[in-house]
Image (cartoon, rainbow, N blue to C red):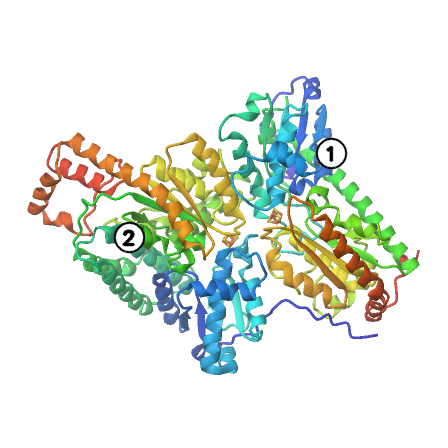
Amino acid sequence: METKEFHYRAYRPRPFTKEERSKTTILFGGLTWKHERLIQGSLERMGYKSMPLPNIERQDLDIGKEFIDVGACCPTTFTAGNLARTLMTLREREGEEGVKNNYLFVTIGACGPCRFGQYHESYERVLEGLNLTDFRLFLLDLMQMEQSAPGGGLEISMPLTFGLVYSMFYADLITDMEYAIRPYEVVEGSTDRVVKESIELLYEKLKNRPIKGKKIDSLVWHVFTGYFVDALKEVRRLWDEIEVDRLRVKPKVKITGEFWLQTHEGDGNYNIKRWLEKEGAEVIPPPVAVWMDYLINMELFKLEDAKGFVKKYYLKKLAIGTIAGLYKMVYNRLRKALNNIPNPLPDQRKLKELARPYFHYRLTGGEGHMLIGKALYAYLNRQAHMICELSPYGCLPNTMSVGAMAKVLGDYPDLLYAPIEIKGDAEVHAYSRCQMILTEAKRRAKEEFEEVLERTGLTVEDIRNFEEDHPELRRATYKVPHYGYAGTASNYAMHIAKLMGRI
Amino acid sequence: MNFLTSLTLLKKRPLKSQGDRRSIKVGIPKFLNIWGTHQFWVGFFQSLGVGRIVFSSDTSEEQYREYGKGRITMDSCFPVKALAGHMGELLHKDINLLFVPMIYSLPSFLKGHVVDTLSCTRVMMSVENIKAGFLRERKEFEERGIAFVSPFVPFAEPELLPKYLWESLKEHIPGLTLEETARAVKEGFRALEDFERKMREKSLEIIRWCVKNNRPAILVLARPYHMDPGIGHDIDGEFQQYGFPVLWYNYLPLDAWLLEWLFGEEIRAGIIRSYFDISDVWTSSYSSNTNEIIWGAKFSARFPWITGVIRLSSYECGMDQPTFTPVQKIVESSGTLFFKFGELDETKPAGSVKIRVETIVYYLEKYSQDIIKKKLSRLGAVPSQLLV
Ligand code: SF4
Ligand code: SF4
């Protein structure tokens, strides 16, 4: 009888031990440079050396296609190509042994049947293609607070998890500030400069944060400490210095879409947020935090459905409800430190209800019902003039929810919705599709502003004169309340009218 | 408190005349994972006493053209788009309830051995997607006097399954209670199990014939709906014409003596934990059909008389994409021949299929006996049950 060993085996990384920690660099990627820099700070505090993958470039798409099976969605292809490019560069610099021993790559899996839960399968093709199957690639489950990679070198503990959560919150909030302010900055480049300074300041804060407790005591400390809020108060002072002109009438464009594409800033989505800004829009970027909030609340909704069948229902509901509540509370405390300029997280229950006639909330994968819920929420609450949905070529769930949007648009014909398919190599086509709808959004923003002037009897000159006596109004951190208009200029004019006692 | 007792405590609706139910004519589109669960639905609705169950016909280009086109709101793989044709066709049939389940998770023989048994995200979401094509301009179902019911169906959550079904059907089936729905679900599962048992017995018969005559068989690895001639284009049938018995991965025999022969050694060596463990070759075992395809690939790699594997995959199939290399490698790791018919769309590529089948048959005829011998040499003595 021949040997019984069948040759094919799934990839299993060799262990990463505690002793290797100080000399092994953890590679990671997939978010914006802001998120990644802050994650680096959090990891360093826990004693890990780390390095984000380089920015996604157009060439990553081609490199990715070379290695992975045909027909992959564009985020999988881009990220696989990015990993391949990084490993090739490192191999050139440090040799094969150097790459294998001095680096490892950590990726997040997300409990699902779309490719997000299977990214690592494609990454394994990269390792095979590069003849680097000895290189270590670890998959961590996003929803598991405590886990470790084989060998114990990488431990996901409570303090590390919270460090990562704060990194994500911080980067989201700074990104929100950035997009709310840059279109109105008086001195060009001042926002970008302050974004960089803010991230560096927060990186230092995360890198030097105190580690208090290990389990529940750590949780309590992280939730209630003033440390993270105080850091943001320092950041706020940097933003105070930016002068803005909110009278620039701009259409507000809310970005939704597939998780990776919508948060990404770079060639992977044709840099569409920057492009929109250049075209005269104000962009509402999607925070990563919304997605985590969605995952937590989904657990709650599922539990509610199972009422009558689960043991200790009320206790479990209380536990998940508390986590969801604390999550929001922490986010809101941080927002407050920035004078509430960043947007609040949407109410997940509301999103679920809004989407319900069009998309069942338990259909999970990608952003699930949220794509429809967010579009409707923004429209009905007059948060934006237009929704730009970034839809990856070859995506499984996204194609389905974009299709379901057809009925939403039938019911709300006024909703300006631009689903943009992102292939990675068809930039002009995507821009021109977006441009068509943006033109209408611009018209609406202008009309809306004129309506406000008419309603309040104000002229631009009146507002300018008022600003001269109240210079604080031109501070980036001055909070303009929402008066039911989508546009920043419109709400601002309403606010001035109110301050002047005209409404 | 057991599950059924807890159900009786929940509010019941008074039962109206049972006779009303006989006037209910349920239309079910034969799409996606209705293939593989249709016997459940037959058992379920029969238990509820509805008058008639009408399935749409097999997918065809004509059906899609006549009833489906113009209702597609977003391009995707053809098995999803075909749903529009099935729903459209049923609207022209004598039905008053159009039942299109959103199948979230599936019954699977691998349950308990894998992380999850979910449907492809497009499978579960397809209904909301295609529904929009019928409703965006008019209320098409209402205008035709047809109630549209599309429950969320988690086969892997036995407590919630009756609840979701009851919630969506109670308005349409007079007097329906949750308790009765739970019983109907049981009947559905029984019908499905009976059907699957018969199919697996059939496969075993085929396998025994192959052993007795020392003839090779072909295994098809695909999604269950590739059995639909309009989706899988009858490619398996082409091989039967050449005298090759064809087995489908989802109806392979699961008898313990057979699996012990194929996998027992690996369990003892600590490579896998059970006959149904696929973690040695596939770690993201979320998707039910994918898991079963992977398991089928493992089976084919070990079973001597399966000498060739035919992989069918639809154009733009995102679920199959990450599995292409692993499945091929699993199959080929034992010398079994592997052939892929990818990118299947609405049109049957008849000419090229014929040519490829001829070539494949040539290889199968040339190498099968060697492959059988080689694979036999890896295993212990052929179990007596196979030699019956
Ligand atoms: S959501 Fe879509 S684009 Fe994102 S990983 Fe899944 S299949 Fe790919
Ligand atoms: S498994 Fe593939 S062919 Fe089937 S619905 Fe999903 S993407 Fe389409």
| Residue at image point 71% right, 34% down | B57
Tell me if residue A176 can be seen. Answer: yes
- Mark 1–mark 2 contact, CB under 8 Å? no
Left or right: A335 in relation to B279: left
Amino acid of disc 1:
Gly
Residue A143 in the image: above or below residue A60: above
Left or right: A488 in relation to A305: left
On-image quarter of the N terminus of chain A: bottom right
Label 2 Cα neighbours within 10 Å, binned few <14 / some 14-19 / many ≥20: few
Tell me if residue B99 can be seen. Answer: no
Give residue A498's position: percent from left, percent from top.
15, 36
Amino acid of disc 2:
Lys
> Residue tagged by mark 2?
A278
> Residue tagged by mark 1?
B43
Along the line of sight, the residue nearer the viewer: A166 or B320: B320
Along the line of sight, the residue nearer the viewer: B59 or A436: A436
Give residue A393's position: percent from left, percent from top.
50, 52
Along the line of sight, the residue nearer the viewer: B51 or A461: A461
Q: What's the chain of the residue with tag 2?
A: A
Residue B141 in the image: above or below residue A221: above
